[in-house]
Image (tube, rainbow, N blue to C red):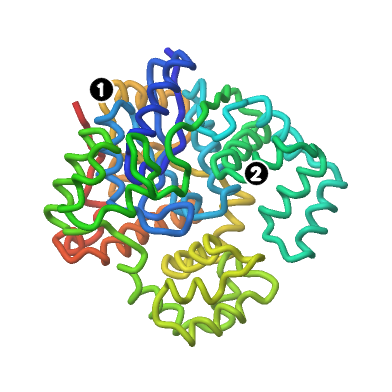
Amino acid sequence: MKVLGLITEYNPFHNGHLYHLEKSKSITGSDYSVAVMSGHFMQRGEPAMINKWLRAEMAIKNGVDLVIELPTIYACSTADQFTKGSISLLSKMNIIDHICFGSESGDIGIFEKISSLLTDPPASLNLLVKHYLDNGNSFARAQQLAISNFYPSPQIKSFFQQPNNILGMLYMKHLKQLNSNIIPYTIKRIGAQYHSKELSNISSATGIRTHIDGINSLPVIKSSIPDHSYQILRAYLAENKTIVKTDDLDLLLMGIVKRMTIHDFRNLPDVTEGLENRLMNCAKKHRTSIEFCKCVKSKRYPQTRIQRILMHALLNIQKKDTYLFHHKKAPSYIRVLAFNEKGRLLLRKCKELSSLPIITKVADFNPKSTSEERMLEIDLQATDLYHLSLPNSYSKKGRLDYLQSPLFIT
């Protein structure tokens, strides 16, 4: 019995994801698959296009056996903390044999080399990072430039220009730091580039989302997603008319930032070096989240960082939360979103081997610590606030996390 772990957002589940799933099963020889999936807010600081249960349903109907939720505190965070939370959760399940991630490189040797450097960085690397930070680069860019000094080649330089390569490097780093027994693999990404908006048989999730504007636009993307995904999206749009976008939360977001003080901004994660002053100034000037982000962003502070700061403000995630969970704690429960019969067997095995509690009904879960309670409360708030953007019955049912059971799909 070999179990494959996947780290995903499935926003939405498209043909590229199906290729990745099937290819990963093949090269690892895995019989079962588990996807750790972001909930209602994404790593780039954006809301999911549709809710987490429907995206989990897409995954199961397309061949994943078990979908568990990555807690929001990790899902809507930096690439380093997103990957750390995901790898930690898979490792703590104690049932995962392999992970397989898609990458533009496709060469596991490069990931091995770079992740080894990051796992135990020499002092000279840290000095180089500081040098590039002092020249106005973001931390991620400064780290990439520093690594390129250790491995000066065109191959390494191009490696860092691709987002999936960067995530893969961090997956490998955290596997090493945890001394995990999980064996990593990578497969070369095919089809459209990560940010491409052009549609084809294998399109990017960004491109697919760009072309969805109500149910009448669905035929445009039909060739880019599996039929199960298409039918789920079709039923959703028949009721909700459109997918969720950041500007659907604009009244909430801008109402919050306009009442915030310098102290409030300073307490948000990723707000450093006086950035709170820039945030405060831009909040006073602008009425929409798009205008606000454009006002704040710079070479040092990329747009995705500003988007995450906005989402942290919305969810009331503060520096003390991220310090606790990113530096002292790890994901402390397994939250089940959907499963099939094989997934049921995985849950039984996980219950035997993992020390983490498994949440199937939120109402029945009793947190054993204040940190565990806080992690769950952030997830519950994320669902509540996400559904305020919807005009239909979803937003009128109260705390959906208490009402919605995991989906069992035969």
Residue that mark 1 sits on: 341
Residue that mark 2 sits on: 160
Q: Residues within 10 Å of mark 1 (few under 14, many from 20)?
A: few
Relative horizontal placement of residue 32, taking residue 324 as reference (left or right): left
Outermost residue on the right side: it is 124
For the N terminus, the image quarter is top left
Query: Relative to 131, does residue 225 appear above or below in the rendering?
Result: above
Residue at horizontal 60 percent and vertical 79 percent from the top: 278
Q: Nearer the viewer, residue 396 or 301?
A: 301
Where's residue 125, x and y in %? 82, 46
Where's residue 312, x and y in %? 48, 65
Asked which quadrant contains residue 242, the reply is: bottom left
Residue at horizontal 60 percent and vertical 42 percent from the top: 166
**Looking at the picture, which amino acid does disc 2 mark?**
Phe
Tag 2 secondary structure: loop
* Of the image marks 1 and 2, the number of the one nearer the N terminus: 2
Relative horizontal placement of residue 236, taking residue 51 as reference (left or right): left
Q: Nearer the viewer, residue 122 or 402?
A: 122
Residue at horizontal 12 percent and vertical 55 percent from the top: 239
Q: Nearer the viewer, mark 1 or mark 2?
A: 2
For the C terminus, the image quarter is top left
Where's residue 223, x and y in %? 25, 36
Q: Cα distance, mark 1 to mark 2?
A: 40 Å
Where's residue 155, x and y in %? 70, 35
Disc on res. 31: none
**Looking at the picture, which amino acid does disc 1 mark?**
Glu
Query: Relative to 200, does residue 322 appear above or below in the rendering?
Result: below
Query: Relative to 328, does residue 24 appear above or below in the rendering?
Result: above
